Image (cartoon, helix red, strand yellow):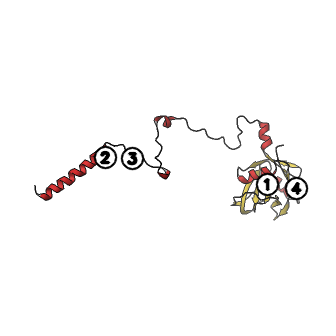
Amino acid sequence: MNGKQKQTVLAVALCLALLLAGCGKAPAQESGAAGTPAAEVTPAAATAAPEPTPAPAGEREENETPEEEEKEMLQMKIGDTAVTVEWEENESVKALAELCEETPLVIEMSMYGGFEQVGSIGASLPRSDVQTTTAAGDIVLYAGNQIVVFYGSNSWAYTRLGHITDKNAAEMAELLGQGDVRLSLSIGG
């Protein structure tokens, strides 16, 4: 063997030695955020019961009675007519309910455009406006400080608050389309 062949054999032997030396070690753990080693999954963790999922919206807690649930619900009256509302679960509705905790919130509404009643809440609420096409019975927040109840349809950027579920379009038009109304919001019955 000449010198060049000896160097090649030596280089190959060195490479093989390095590769074989690495074979006996455990693979390196992947690192998580900020260099923290990733969590290992142990057989016990892999077979553990999954975390309980929260109850769907509208279902009450096991220890909450129907009377307690009724007390916490936001109620709406248009004039003297109580309406059933399916409220959205968002920060705007929570803030609106907080305004009604001590005393009912009474809002003088005005007809607008032949399809809605609009009234000032008297406070600014959190909002997350989205381009929306409304329908009769929809309740939305406009400009963060006005509540709008529809008896027709419109398309604009609103924050959805809820929908009146116990009146159809004709009943909504009868309730809201005859002149200005007074809206009352309260907690519980």
Nearest to N terminus: mark 4 or mark 3: 3
| Gap between marks 2 and 3 measured at Cα | 11 Å
Q: Are marks 2 and 1 in contact (CB under 8 Å)?
A: no
Give the residue at mark 2. 22
Residue 181, horizontal then vertical, whole percent: 88, 57
- Location of residue 151 by image quarter: bottom right
Q: Name the residue that disc number 1 marks.
A: 169
Task: Identify the amino acid type marked 2.
Answer: Gly
Residue 139 place in picture, x, y as percent: 77, 55
Measure the alpha-carbon separation of dots 4 and 3: 69 Å
Residue at 12 percent of width and 58 percent of height: 3
Disc 2 crowd rating (10 Å Cα; few below 14, some 14-19, many 20+) is few
Residue under pointer 4: 182
N-terminal-most mark, 2 or 1: 2
Residue at the disc numbered 3: 28
Q: Amino acid at mark 4?
A: Arg
Residue pictured at 77% horizontal, 40% vertical: 69
